[in-house]
Image: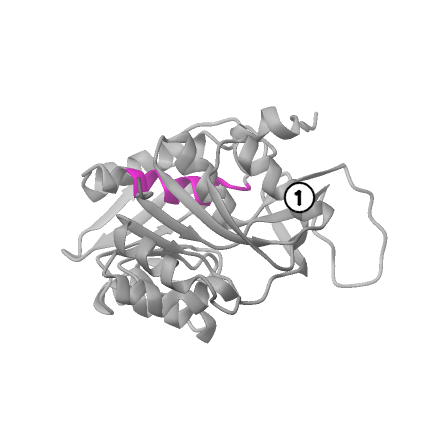
Amino acid sequence: MTASVFLAGPASWNRMVLLDRLPEPVPHMQFAEASWETVGGTSAGKALALSALGRSAVLHAVAGPDEDGRRVRAALEAAGVVAQWTDGTTERHLNLMTRKGERVSLYLSAPAETAGAGDSVRAAEMAAADAVVLDLAAEPRRLLPLAAASGTPLWVDVHDYDGVDGYHRPFLDAAAAVFCNADRLSAPVEFLRAVIAGGAAFAVCTLGAAGAVAVGTDGIELRVPALPATVVDTNGAGDAFFAGVLDARLRGADLASALSAGARSAAGVLGTRHLHPLLDAVLGDPRVS
C-alpha cells in the first residue's frame, strides 16, 4: 500500500553539546555541561513523530555508506521509520545548546541534490500520497516541480524564516500548508496572512512556550497554548507539532482541533534528549542531571 505521506528531507547524525550559555563571538574557552550523539534532521523528526502517531509515511533521505550514515539508517529503522535511502554525503551537525533551548547549529556536511535517477517512481509516489512534505534542503528543493505536478497538497516547514530569504521562496510559492517559527519574524501573524494571500490553505507559526498561532483562508486567527511538560530538550518539538497537525488534518480534523493535536504531539517529545522518545530504546537515554 502506498504511504499516505511522502516525506523528503534531512536525516543527520548530530553531536549535541550542552552549554551554560551560547558562545560569544570572541576567542575564549567554555566547558560543556554534557555532550552526546544522536539522530538529527527535521525530516527524521517528522518521520519519527508520524510513525508514533500510527500514520503511514515514507522518508526519502540521503546518507552515505560511512559510519555515521550507517548509524542514522540503523537507528531510524530500529525506531520503526520506513525510509528509502539514496547514497550520498551524510549530513552532520554540531549543535550547541543551552538548557533554555537556545541553539546554534553548525553544519559539518550536507548532501547535494541527486541526479534524479528515480524521479519517475517518486512522481508516482507523490501522486498516490495524501500529502507531500518537502523540507528545506537541496534534494527536496529539486523535487518541488514534481510535487507541484503531482496534484497532492504540499506541506512545507520554513523554520526560522526571516520573511525575505530567497532560498525559501520556491517552497512558499508551491505550498498548500506552511509552518514556521517566530525566531526571526517581527510580525508573525502578518506573515501568516501574507502566506494565505499567496495561495496557501493555512499557515502556522510556532511560538515556543507560548504555543502556536495559525491563520486559514477565512482569515480567523487561531491560537493554541503549549501543554505543560517537563522540558529536557526542545529538539524535535517543532517537527512533532507539524506531524501532529498533519496527522489530524488527514483524519478530517478542523484547523483548531489539529493545532491541539500538534500541541499534544510536541509535548510528548520534550522529555527526551533525542528527536523523539522512540529513539530512547534504540540509542539510550543520555539525560543530564
Name the residue at 52% across, 26% down: 230
The answer to whether residue 225 is seen in the rendering is: no
Q: Residue at x 74, y 63 (%)?
A: 25
- Give x and y (percent) for residue 64: 65, 54
Percent across and percent down for residue 171 are 38, 66
Q: In the rendered view, tell whether residue 220 sits above or below residue 168.
A: above
Q: How is the image coloured?
A: one colour
Which residue sits at x=82%, y=43%? 31
Left or right, residue 31 beside residue 230:
right
Specify the quadrant of the image occupied by residue 215. Answer: bottom left
Q: How many marks?
A: 1
Q: The C terminus lies in which quarter of the figure?
A: top right
* Place of residue 237 in the rendered image (x, y in percent of width and height, measured from the top left): 48, 40
Q: Estimate the x, y position of residue 113 in percent, counting from the top left.
A: 53, 67
Q: In the rendered image, which residue does mark 1 sit on?
A: 70
Magenta stretch, main secondary structure class: helix
Q: Say whether residue 237 is left or right of residue 153.
A: right
Number of residues whose C-alpha sits closer than 10 Å to that of mark 1, classed few (under 14), some (14–19) or many (20 or more): some
In the picture provided, is 21 more to the left or to the right than 261? right
9 left or right of 192 in image: right
Q: Is residue 162 above or below residue 21?
A: below
- Vertical position of residue 44 compared to residue 228: above or below: below
In the rendered image, residue 237 lying in the magenta stretch gets the answer yes
Q: Name the amino acid, label 1.
A: Arg
Judge whether 9 appears above or below 55 on screen: below
Magenta residues? 235-247
The secondary element bearing badge 1 is classed as helix
The residue drawn where x is 66% and y is 48% is 69
- Extreme residue toward the left, this view: 218
